[in-house]
Image (cartoon, helix red, strand yellow):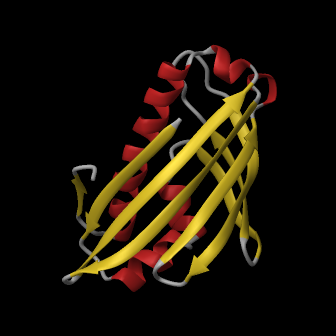
Amino acid sequence: MEFGGRYRIAAPRMAVWAALNDPEMLKAAIPGCDHIAWAGPDSLDLEIRVNLGIAKPVFKGELALSNVLPAESYTLAGRGKGGLMGLAEGAADITLSDDGEATFLAFVAQGGGSGQIMKLGKALVGNSAQRVIDGFFERFADAMGARIEPLDPV
């Protein structure tokens, strides 16, 4: 499954970059996040309770950062095990650029799963994932105290 989005955040690019790398900001923005902390210079451990409608599995896993260009872009890849629900994994390429005094954020992500999670059907999982993504950026901007404007896809 592929996802993507573009947003204008009313904050300087350095502030957005710092917030994207702050576990407390991320915890406030990720629905169901019970734990997130740096495990190393380029990895975070996390635990997330995901609402998939009929199921609410807890996924424990790791996020790894790569291709890091500070305050410009990185690739974020994650994998989490949800017990009987199976495995969920995904990766996102995130880019930041200046938009006047605001920041333009764009991302392209791919994700999927195995086991029981896929038996729920791609439509249910895809719709839930898109709601999670949309909600993440709204809560992320709120945690920063910044206004956010979703933009049309390219």
Quadrant location of residue 39? Answer: bottom right
Q: Nearer the viewer, residue 80 or 33?
A: 80
Front-most of residues 122 and 101: 122
Rendering coords of residue 131 (x, y %) = 40, 36
User: In terms of depth relative to the viewer, which is nearer, 11 or 130?
Assistant: 130
- What residue sits 54% from the left and 29% below the top? 51
Indicate the position of residue 104 as horizontal and vertical percent values. 30, 70
For residue 103, side relative to residue 95 (left or right): left
Please state the horizontal and vertical placement of residue 143, each as a whole percent of the image.
39, 64
Looking at the picture, does residue 120 appear above or below residue 46? above
Query: Is residue 33 rendered to the left or right of residue 71?
Result: right
| Quarter of the figure with residue 139 | bottom left
Look at the picture and state if 121 lies above or below 41.
above
Q: Residue at x 67, y 70 (%)?
A: 66
Residue drawn at (32%, 57%), measured in percent from left and top?
Answer: 6
> Vertical placement of 88 versus 78: above or below?
above
